[in-house]
């Protein structure tokens, strides 16, 4: 009987490993395919001749992208928006989440409702645009950082983390040592909150890095536009150019457009994906700790 149970356990473990391996393959292979497709001849990709390695290596897609002078400027813009916007987002959302977690905060119940409502109801694009324009942020570097820095979802996650992970006894001990609220938050709470800082920082960075719609609405100055918007414009222009031509030239333009499409995916996602291995430990811990209490 014991041997039979052991056999069932072994079979179950094998099934789990096989399913896990298939799930990993389903996630990794599309990413790998995009990478190898960016270095492959589009005709080989279209004919299904590219599976695990480029059949013919080519750098035409990358060369065509990097020949665009605005690419480097937009890349710098995106890095600046992401770095400054992430720091500003943490500066705004983390203290707000901590304040809402304090039981002695006056009007705490109504403030929680105040932050929840915008998660379901938006003022709309036109009122937001008029508000942004009234404060002079249209065609301004800071329009990608300040107006959309407050995230009710991130504030609620931070609030839940502080409620479930920072015991009240620490605040009582800090008071006995003569520590005030700001000193307690800076010296005790923040060092114990690396997990939620990493999680919210990563979410904020990914959101800003992939942002293009706000730039499309609020930034007409090409020198201020981020990478995602510039890539979108280049790809649309190439597709329109290929659609307006015929014959061999149309086929060549379509192939170039496909190569640039794959290359743009790689250069726009690789930097932000490189952050995940360094933050994975804090990311998993922060999500679990932040979900203990509602």
Image (tube, rainbow, N blue to C red):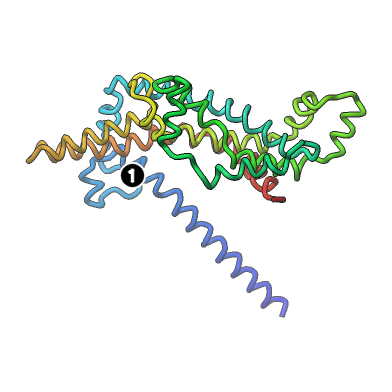
Q: Is residue 11 above or below residue 269?
A: below
Label 1: which secondary element: loop
Q: Is residue 1 visible?
A: yes
Residue 102 percent across, percent down from the top left: 77, 38
Q: Residue 65 occupies which quadrant of the picture?
A: top left
The N terminus sits in image quarter: bottom right
Q: Is residue 281 visible?
A: no
Left or right: where 282 falls relative to 220: right
Residue 170 percent across, percent down from the top left: 85, 35
Q: Residue 59 occupies which quadrant of the picture?
A: top left
**Residue farthest toward the right in the current orientation of the protein:** 176
Residue drawn where x is 67% and y is 33% of the image: 96
Q: Give the class, few, some or many, for how many residues have Cα within 10 Å of label 1's Cα (few <14, many ≥20).
A: some
Asked whether 149 or 16 is in front, the reply is 149
Asked whether 20 or 158 is in front, the reply is 158
**Residue farthest toward the left in the current orientation of the protein:** 247
Left or right: where 4 falls relative to 58: right
Residue indicated by mark 1 = 53
């Amino acid at each position: 009987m014991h041997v039979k149970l052991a056999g069932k356990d072994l079979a179950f473990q094998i099934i789990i490993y096989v399913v896990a391996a298939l799930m990993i393959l389903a996630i990794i292979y599309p990413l790998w395919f995009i990478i190898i497709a960016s270095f492959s001849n589009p005709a080989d990709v279209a004919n299904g001749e590219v599976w695990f390695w480029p059949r013919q290596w080519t750098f035409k897609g990358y060369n065509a992208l990097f020949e665009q002078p605005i690419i480097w400027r937009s890349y710098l813009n995106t890095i600046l928006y992401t770095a400054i916007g992430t720091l500003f987002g943490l500066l705004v959302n983390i203290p707000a989440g901590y304040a809402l977690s304090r039981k002695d905060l006056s009007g705490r119940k109504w403030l929680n409702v105040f932050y929840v409502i915008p998660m379901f109801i938006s003022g709309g694009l036109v009122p937001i645009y008029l508000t942004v324009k009234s404060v002079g942020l249209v065609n301004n570097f800071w329009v990608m950082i300040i107006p959309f820095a407050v995230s009710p979802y991130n504030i609620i996650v931070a609030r839940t983390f502080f409620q479930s992970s920072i015991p009240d006894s620490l605040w009582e001990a800090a008071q006995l040592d003569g520590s005030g609220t700001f000193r307690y938050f800076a010296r005790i709470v923040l060092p114990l909150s690396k997990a939620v800082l990493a999680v919210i920082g990563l979410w904020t960075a990914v959101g800003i890095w992939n942002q293009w719609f706000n730039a499309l609405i609020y930034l007409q100055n090409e020198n201020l536009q981020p990478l995602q918007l510039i890539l979108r414009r280049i790809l649309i222009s190439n597709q329109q150019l290929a659609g307006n031509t015929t014959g061999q030239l149309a086929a060549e333009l379509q192939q170039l457009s496909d190569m640039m499409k794959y290359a743009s995916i790689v250069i726009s996602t690789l930097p932000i994906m490189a952050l995940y291995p360094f933050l994975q430990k804090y990311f998993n811990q922060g999500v679990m700790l932040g979900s203990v209490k509602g």
